[in-house]
Amino acid sequence: MTQKFDFSVNGKPVSVSLDNEETPLLNVLRNELGLMGTRFGCGLEQCGCCMVLIDGQPEKCCAKPVWSVAGKNITTIEGLGTSERPHPLQQAFIDEQAGQCGYCLSGIIITAKALLDKNPSPTRAQIAAALDDNICRCGTHNRIMRAVEKAAAQMRAGARA
Amino acid sequence: MNAPLPGPLADNPSLDRWVSFPSPGKISIGTGRVELGQGVLTAMAQIAADELDVAMARITMRSGDTERTPNEGYTAGSQSIQFGGVAMRQACADVRALFLEQAAKIIGCAAAELSIRDGRILRKNAPTGQDYWTLASAVNLAVKATGSGARKPAADFETIGQSSERLDLPDKIFGKAVFIHDMQLPGMVHARVVRQPNRGATIGAIDEQAIKRAAKGRIDFVRHGNFLAIVGNDETAVDLAGAAAVNAVTWQNVEAPTALQAEASWLLQRPWIDRVFGAPDTGEPQGRQRFEATYSRGYLAHASISPSCGLAEYRDSHLTVWTHCQGVFPLRAALAKALGLDASAIIVHHVQGSGCYGHNGADDAAADAAIIAMQMPGKPIRVRWRREEEFVYEPKTPSMVVKVHALLDDAGKPTDWTQEIWSATHNKRPGAGGVLLGAVALPTPMPEPPPNDVPEANGGGATRNGEPLYDIAAKRILHHLVTDTPVRTSALRSLGAMPNVFALECCIDELAERAGQDPVQYRLSITADKRARAVIEKVAAMARWNPKEPGGAGHGRGIAFARYKNRAAYSAVVVELDVDEEIRLAHVWCATDAGLVVNPDGAINQLEGGIIQSASWVLKEQVRFDSGVSSIDWETYPVLKFSEVPEIDIELINTKDEVPLGVGEVTAGPTAAAIGNAVSHALGTRIRDLPLTRDRIMATLLKA
């Protein structure tokens, strides 16, 4: 039976019609809405590639049923910034060349944004603890953490987020 | 008379495969190398920019395409810059020379008066009104490279040697659809394979109703022999069905790996073929001290952050495949064999996947898509492996036992060295005769190759780095090639080098201790190789190595060195760590000589990535079996976390050398051994079996 699910993504209202109310939000973002920035890593809520903000809170969405996000505001990597107007985190990741394969970066940047929203001056240890929710297999950890520190400093200095 | 062409250029001499001018102001550069996350496309663009004298912004890269790029085999073995880069330099230099020749004809002067600046031809530094694009229609690039083009002198490099920003990174940071997993073709059908658990396993019963109920959406079955797949237009339905099918399909003739088989020691009782390399055994001279020590490492998984994905379409007797595998040309040949097609009827395009560290499930996912596509002509098929499927079915690096036998002189220095290695093959790539998994399930199963390993000429597999670089009068390798293992084994970053360097560099420390000598001094005393000495001395200085630093109090430092394959980059690593019940890495220093470095920041990124990955292998990783592979997700196969990664300092030396040396895999072995040596320093006793888990540490502490 087809149902309609209404929520918002990156500030825009969306309405999707699906037969299966358990359809993971990740699949809806990618396959229904064409937003490929949120990525599939495991489907088991273990690796963090699928991290999004749901009403501002970081959550993995690969196993999150779409019925549970009805009425909520979803923020994906596409909603943070663009090449014309990058989010300070995105600019910092480019400045620090914080990527090897780059597949984990969307989820990591979302986790980092959630951290900086809560704690604008995190220590290295606090950054690491927050990012323990995400896996990077290529070994880009230190660059990533330096990029988060750099973005935090820029944002404290007034860079527009 | 010209020097012989660099290998990849000799193999692909037609210049139009390397360089073309598709539109005004733009250049298209073709490379057979593919982006694995190592930055190779950016580096190749830098090389092309310098040799063609154009701004990098004018260049777009085409890579890994059977229709449009050179065939450079596999992007593997840390060879892309060392061999592919050298070929790219010469190809571009030849193209530049052809254009200068044409310009000289048109302008009516000697080519020697001409130079090029951002694509524009200058005569004695003044504009001529000619550029690559005004001349392109008159210059035929479908000609053979001659090697006569003059390469740019190092003193004139403008982009080579710069830390140019990664071309592909911004799109990834802004969440663009750049990965193979993001591809959407019109009319695309999603698929999940119900995997044959082992060769010879046959489908017993399929509970189609249970699978359809679980799908909560329309799905269909595709079956060909014992190859079974679930297909449908809704990925969620196909995903749910694929998960349900694991238990809803029964198999006969299943051979599940057992717990015991996961241990390296199991190899010692298996059948093997002996392979011997190096100096003949001298027998047992009198008056020599002997030394023996045995080291081991279990199976490792690639565990790339995303499982494999492949797409295919079969239309009008032609097969098109999209894949993130390392070698599109070898894959094409293997698909032709497996599917009974002519290679000329197959096109393979590389599209980036997540980090590739060797022979993972990518080739197989491509083959899965191809098999299904041939059963459903005209429909684009997308196969994405499940996370558990990747962990279970991707090839593993084989477990290894390495026993070092050394004879010592009166000063305690080795005069005779035997590295005795037990290991299955490190190469079951389809291009080396290995199978495509799906094709093993077909009515006529793809045959298993005879036991072999990577040839020594290509750096060896199990034997890689099994010969110490040190000045030892007689060195030999005795490889017991174990001919059969419960899981498929193939190439993972550095192949046999990590366990071989772990064993030999830990032995060097043991010998230094016996000789009462500091580990750094001992190493320097047995190598005259200037470049080896330079990285060892450099890293010792970086880490402020203190020969008198006492150990045994749970805090330790260790050093290790290797030259990858004894012919690529040189690297020395110092590790500082603390151990109580677990190991906590505090700091890692690394000095590497990679010769001419095209992109220093890119090289450092790779060196650091290799350090962290090797540390993860050593501290945490072992594929376990329990009636099948039981390391199936990130909880059962944990990897190093952000909070566990140490501070890392890396320096490149000798970067103005003429010749580039491959860096992608060089830190794997030295990092493992430096950790082993640091743990020994910290505990006062040595652990020789990897991984260095809490259980092993506790057992060692209790024994001591």
Image (cartoon, grey):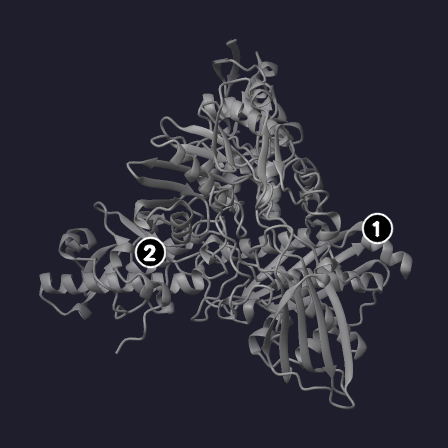
Q: CA distance from mark 2 to mark 1?
A: 52 Å
**Is residue A153 visible from the viewing direction of this image?**
no
Quadrant where the C terminus of chain B is found in the figure:
bottom right
Asked whether, in this view, residue A129 is left or right of residue B18, the answer is right
**Is residue B219 visible from the viewing direction of this image?**
yes
User: Residue B640 appears at what percent x and percent y?
Assistant: 68, 46
User: Residue B451 appears at what percent x and percent y?
Assistant: 55, 61
Label disc, if present, on residue B581 of the rendered structure: 1
Question: Which residue corresponds to the image point at 69% horizontal and 42% vertical from the top-left?
Answer: B630
Q: Element under label 1?
A: loop
Q: Residues within 10 Å of mark 2 (few under 14, many from 20)?
A: many
Q: Tell which circle, 2 or 1, labels the residue nearer the N-terminal end.
A: 2
At label 2, the amino acid type is Pro
Label disc, if present, on residue B70 of the rendered structure: 2
Q: Element under label 2?
A: loop
Tell me, yes or no, whether the two marked residues, 2 and 1, touch with CB atoms within 8 Å: no
